[in-house]
Image: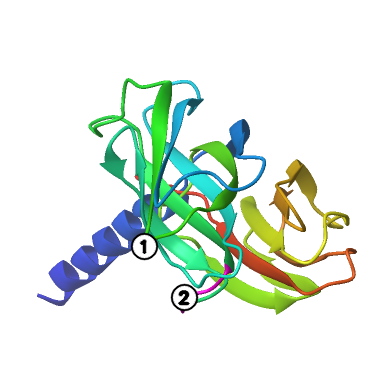
Amino acid sequence: MIAVALVLVALATAAAILVFRHASPIAVSPVSTLNTGGLVPGPAVMAPSKSIGEVAANRDIWLEISWKFFGELRTLNAVTVGGVPARRLVRSNEVPASADSEIWVITAGSGDKLEKATSADIGFAFDGGNPAITMQIYRVVGASEEPAAKVAEIGSSISIAIPADGVALISLIASGTDSGSLSNVTKDFRARCGKDFLGIHASKSSTSAESVTATFSGGVAANFAAVALQPALEMR
């Protein structure tokens, strides 16, 4: 009986080792953007025919979204990609606000409703008013749908821990200026969007585990949202 038990333990250990290996490194590509250039009619906004990148079996679509209302406190209630609801991971304000930066995700690989789509209409549903919006869309392959970390911050910088072979996505809105930059990241999209609204959407890849701090140089407090993506696991 003892010998049998030892064999079972050894088999279970070997199976665990097989299951918990990382898949291939994460591939992240910025594929399309949105800049409304100022206020647009709301509360529903549609960005038609945005690229979501080439089809892949384990593809996810990540969206960095910054928005502002002038003199109104609002909430972004829903985002859809090709009519399919996306899921919000993090936002800089958890209460109604006049400005916010957020990160959303939707699966678009094999077996998903968007598995064959290379472009899609992006829909935004606010709880009222007329927003101004910037957005960067990323095609991500090989990442877990659950991030290793989520961070929201209001100030001059944001720090996030990136796992080995991981990627950080960092989004900000600076609502009191139309100038400034973001350090220590790859700035995938920077847009002035109407009066005193700057949206910056960025990413950062890392081969080793590290903590990254991105600092905004615009001289005002910015609203930050960030996620750290970790490689998906696969059975080998």
- Magenta span includes 95: yes
Name the element at disc 1.
loop
Please tell me whether the stretch drawn in magenta is mainly helix, strand or loop. Answer: loop
Q: Which residue is mark 2?
A: 96
Circle on res. 127: 1
- Sequence-wise first label, 1 or 2: 2
Inspect the image, locate mark 2, and give the three-letter code of the amino acid beneath it: Pro
Residue under the image location 23 percent in, 31 percent down: 111
Neighbours of disc 1 within 10 Å: few (<14), some (14-19), many (20+) = some
Q: Position of residue 158 (x, y in %)?
A: 73, 71
At x 79%, y 72%, the residue is: 157
Q: For the view shown, which residue lies furthest in the left direction?
A: 1
Which residue is drawn at the image coordinates 36% and 62% (left, top)? 127
Q: Nearer the viewer, residue 173 or 164?
A: 173
Residue 35, magenta (yes or no): no
Mark 2: give few (<14), some (14-19) or many (20+) Cα within 10 Å: few
For residue 117, say whether it is visible. yes
